[in-house]
Amino acid sequence: MDRSLYIAMNGAKQTLMAQSANANNLANAQTTGFKSDFEQFRAMPSFGPGYPSRVYSMTERPGTDLSNGSIYHTGRELDVAVEGQGWIAVTGKDGKEAYTRAGDLRLTPEGLLQTGAGLSVLGEAGQPIAVPPAQKVEIGKDGTISIVPQGVNATNTVLVDRIKLVSADPANLEKLEDGLMHPKQGGVLPADANVTLVQGSLESSNVNAMAAMVEMIELSRSFDMQSKVMKDIDENAAAAAKLMQVA
């Protein structure tokens, strides 16, 4: 069988993987603080005995678009958006510190401060933030959490903790399968006092839904082309086998 069939098959496989990444971006077009992923593969000659006349598609680790989404006002006191560059420290599902831009915060019945995805928000000491029962909660521009305890005069505020806000060179961050950002070198990032928040606001996803739809159509056409190539190769192989039988 001609090796071109495997080349076309490989191209179709990579196109399907790209379509999967693009579909995930499109599905998260309305997810708070979501960062879109790039579909990434490149041509690679197949080296071996003889001249490398065959070129395969090689999968590469996809990158992430870390550009900021737009900030929109919600008026909810527990909603925060990172202003400019920076990240909110949270505890990932594996128990390790990770970073997100999703500021749709909430309080559990136990008083733990979590994101909308149920991840615990960390304080400057690197521990989950617990908020005592309060009649009002305010999050300052620097991430400080102040409350008016229940049964206390509204002018008496108490400082609870400060959200750990970090900054990092985008080249040193990577998105893992949990959808959170992690330092490429491992470990944790130090708090950065220069990172600020906007209370009562959220950052939208940076996915361009229209561009993602166009990309989906282009990838679908590419897959159809690869499928047609495989069909033509199969037909040619069948015709060649028939000629050999005649001979």
Image (cartoon, rainbow, N blue to C red):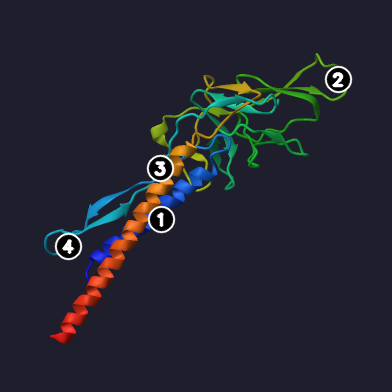
What type is the residue that disc 4 sits on?
Gly
Q: Earlier in the sequence, mark 4 or mark 2?
A: 4
Report which residue position mark 3 lands on.
Answer: 38
Report which residue position mark 2 lands on.
Answer: 152
Q: Earlier in the sequence, mark 1 or mark 4?
A: 1
What type is the residue that disc 2 sits on?
Val
> Which secondary structure, mark 2?
loop
Disc 4 vs disc 3: Cβ atoms closer than 8 Å?
no
Q: Earlier in the sequence, mark 1 or mark 3?
A: 1
Asked which quadrant contains residue 107, the reply is top right
Q: Name the front one of labels 1 and 3.
A: 1
Report which residue position mark 4 lands on.
Answer: 48
Asked which quadrant contains residue 128, the reply is top right
Q: Looking at the image, which residue sits at the far right?
A: 151
How many neighbours does mark 2 have within 10 angstroms: few (below 14), some (14-19), or many (20 or more)? Answer: few
How many neighbours does mark 1 have within 10 angstroms: few (below 14), some (14-19), or many (20 or more)? Answer: some
The answer to whether 132 is drawn above or below residue 142 in the figure is below
